[in-house]
Amino acid sequence: MNQGPEQNHYSDDEIDLRALFATLWRGKWTILATTFLFAVAGVAYALSKPNIYQASVLLAPAQDESGGSLGGQLGGLASLAGINIGGGGANQTVVAKEVLQSHAFLASFIRRHNLKIPLMAAKAWDTEKQNWVIDRKIYNPNADEWQTGEDGISLEPTAWDMVKKFKEDHLAISNNIETGMVTISVKSKSPPAAKNWAELLVNDVNEHMRRKDVKKAQARIAYLEAKLNQTGLADMKQVFYQLIESETRTVMLASAHNEYVFETIDPPVAPQDKSEPNRAFISVISTLVGGVFGVLIVFLLRVFRRN
């Protein structure tokens, strides 16, 4: 008597599984057709995407040679004079990374190196001719003018558009907390461009930070010289002379170092292998989605027919 419900339960499960497989078998052509269509669409989409190449440069924080023992000895007196002569290497690195991602720096970088057309109007890279393939629907290279959209507005990008695209599609910055190393990665449809842009970014951020510190040091020197002329105390004059010497040393060291904030450990190279798209992965995923979608269609049709 106790085995009756269990037998009925197993019998119901068996009937349900049989009905399930029978439904799938009857809708096999729908499933196969849907899977095939999704697979073809996935392959077509994967083939339509251009190859993207990535170049990376490994950087280390440059040694801070300007903040020596003299700066430590005179730090208190400099504070009394209203000047901060200390320089933290780690802080400089953090500031430099933020500068690299700032709108002002990237807008100037794009404008200075004429990246507007490669960034916004290039649809591919011609490996044989080693030049950009321009999308003429966006930019006309013969007339050197940007096209207009359906609304009559020029397609010429603004600085905001270019910086946004560069940050989202091309630039990636990461750092190793344990070693302090910084990696700058640049993606592009062109392997030479990816390498060149990575080099230019490092050079420009070093130059930007160097000029900024030199400008600050020169302003402090001018301030100290003005204070020197105003004081008549011999001891204070000696302090001002030492502070001016320290700031002059900062200017000299900054002017002598090209790798001011970041020192290149592993320079970028033009990549030979693409980093994306993963066409095989796209094709497999689209095929699986098509199969799932086909099964869903079969079950929905069965429910509609019952109703």
Image (tube, grey):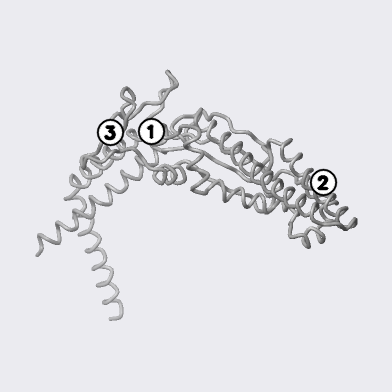
Q: Earlier in the sequence, mark 3 or mark 2?
A: 3
Q: Earlier in the sequence, mark 1 or mark 3?
A: 1
Q: Which mark is on residue 147?
A: 3
Q: Mark 2 points at which residue?
A: 245
Instruction: Give the amino acid at mark 2.
Output: Glu
Q: Name the residue under label 1.
A: 50
Distance from Cα at disc 1 to Cα at disc 3 = 22 Å
Residue 82: quadrant of the picture: bottom right
Kind of element beneath mark 2: helix
Looking at the image, residue 223 sits to the left or right of residue 174; the answer is right
Few, some or many residues within 10 Å of mark 2 (<14, 14–19, 20+): some
Instruction: Give the amino acid at mark 3.
Output: Gln
Residue 16 place in picture, x, y as percent: 23, 63
Residue 50 place in picture, x, y as percent: 38, 33
Q: Residue at x 72, y 53 (%)?
A: 88
Kind of element beneath mark 1: loop
Which quadrant of the figure contains the N terminus? bottom left
